[in-house]
Image: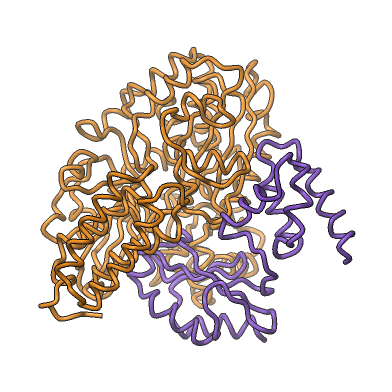
Amino acid sequence: MTRKIYVPADSCAIALGADKVAASLELQLGPEFNVIRNGSRGLFWLEPLIEVESEQGRIAYGPVLPDNIDEAFVNAVKSAGKHPLCLGLTEEIPELKCQQRLSFARLGITDPLNIDDYIAHGGFEGLHTALTLSAQEIVDEVQTSGLRGRGGAAFPTGIKWQTVLTTEASQKHIVCNADEGDSGTFADRLMMEGDPFCLIEGMIIAGLAVGADKGFIYLRSEYPRAATQLQQAIDIAEANHFLGNNIAGSDKCFRLELRIGAEAYICGEETSLLRSLEGKRGMVSAKPPIPAISGLMGQPTIVNNVITLASVPFILAKGAEHYQSFGLGRSRGTLAFQLAGNIKRGGLYEFAFGMSLRELVFDIAGGCRHGDAHAIQIGGPLGAYLPESLWDTELDYEAFATIEAGIGHGGIVLFNQDVNLAQQARFAMEFCAAESCGKCTPCRIGSTRGTEVMDRIIARQSTDQNLELLDDLCDTMELGSLCAMGGMTVIPVRSAKQHFPEDFHSGAQSRD
Amino acid sequence: MSDDQLKHALAELAMAHRDQLGGLMPLLHAVQKQYGYIPEICAATVAPVFRLSTAEVDGVISFYHQFKSRPQGKHRVQICRAEACQANGCRSLEQFSKDHLQLDYGESSDDGLISLDSVYCLGLCSHGPAVRVDDELYVQVDNEKMTRIIRELTS
């Protein structure tokens, strides 16, 4: 009997040499070993993380770089034995063991493109449950679970689905927003590369819930590997009758198509995304009408983020009550936090809501890799920069709203003392100027003027007047912009100015 | 290839996407893949197929950073300049790379080998600075690693 050895085929692992490691192991281990290319466990500081089957469970080694593969290593792997790179049982790695992996239950455990492996690990259980329920019953389950949009806006998913279900139309659509453009986020990428069938299953269930037989995944072109994984997964699901006509032996049908964006951050905004899917410029449109009533081609459309949709199979399989039992207040279930930037143990951390930011970033992820932690940006490029005095804030949507910040998609970027927050504020404006769709003036012109104002502040020219001008401009952008691009660009700017005034004022020493 | 041949080829590509919902985007990807950029006559040629005006198609091409109106280098080097990579020093890597290649973002080398572009996030945010060369990804790129990457492209 052959023994299995796992070498992740995830983008980050590959960038660190996983393909070379896999090829080299295959060559040296011989035919009694079967090298499986699994997804990443999300413990990026240990990538490439190699695992070997043993009687106790999977034994992990990492980080295993191509240069580490010598005779001693190969012998250790063969016997699942001792080696300086051995980490013991994977499941016992403290940063993994402490997590609550619900949506990411299979991440790194399965071969992402092996549908039998997916089924053996609980795949399609949610779909089978859904096929026994009425459309309204599926929507009720999602409502009860308390699931909110994981793309950043945190809108209750059940309410969105109910609107699409209730709106009468001859054609409805399910659109997955896989335009994960926020810096510091990679949970969508991990899901699409590491467990693509889970997203597909979530989309099929969404289709059953609202009576839509057609779905699109709008994926950003910056994720080339996710594109090939998803397309293969769609083809495999079709060949196994989970997509197409008579899905899973039922009388229901659902077709799914992958579409690729073309490097435009704004297409992560749902109305912009829908225009792009229609083959147009990704211009934002005013709401109402909301996409749930008039979306793709003017038809009722669910637009949900990757993790939102991929959370649905678990909810249907294990029950809404079970999912709801995680988290607190109005933040139910788990969130896939992504630890990024200058961080010692960066990666994916799925936890129930409620832990403090400090606990997660420092106690679990180890704080900065180099230097001392100085600022944390949470929620992507439109998220706030937080100083140490706010790091004890509890990680839930409501607690973050009270400090004028947001958890967003769960991306957390750590900076050390080298960061200059005035430069970061300038970058927020510059980014907005580069990525604005241009439809509304506050965003299009405001961001350009904002970059200029920040340049003057950084050059210490008439600081007081320019800071006043900046406040005024931020108010205009916040209140006058059509969507979150212009409206929320002010969040990093204001938070940088409020919490790190020393970087903005003429009295202080410039640190750049 | 003559203009007529090019027009014919573009029209044929367009026909393949005509009946697809929102087929213009997949078509433009196909054109760029085939020619390395979107030739100037593309808009006027494919517009009637999609029942659009030339201006509308031009509008779509110019909206997206990825669609290029000029021939590009054989290899596309993209440096991530988003916040997580900034936290790991991408600002200095950007400057070094521009100086080393003597190119600014959006420019191509005279020998037609390399185009330099920025990118906002490759999803490798715990291991920045991240760089993409065509479909290859690189992490923890410092000046030395960048020099090596460029040397491999030019040798």
Q: Is residue A224 above or below residue A210?
A: below
Q: Quadrant of the C terminus of chain B?
A: bottom right
Q: Is residue A380 left or right of residue A361?
A: right
Image coordinates of residue A261 in percent, x first then y, are 57, 50
**Residue drawn at x 40%, y 28% as measured from the top left:** A315
Residue found 61% across the figure and 17% down from its top:
A170
A230 relative to B122 in the view: left or right: right
Asked whether A430 or A367 is in front, the reply is: A430
Give the left or right position of residue B138, taking residue A141 as reference. right
Of the chain colours in the picture, the one used for chain A is orange
Question: From what the image shows, is residue A170 above or below residue B121?
Answer: above
Q: Position of residue A322 (x, y in %)?
A: 32, 26
Q: Pick whichever, A192 or A114, lies toward us.
A: A192
| Residue A169 figure quarter | top right
At 24% across and 78% down in the image, what residue appears? A459
Closer to the camera, B95 or A243? B95
Which quadrant of the figure has residue A139? top left
Chain in purple in the render: B
Decide if residue A360 is on the left or right side of residue A161: left
| Residue A82 visible in the shown view | no
Query: Which x, y percent locates residue A42?
Result: 41, 54
Would residue B134 be visible to someone looking at this image? Answer: yes
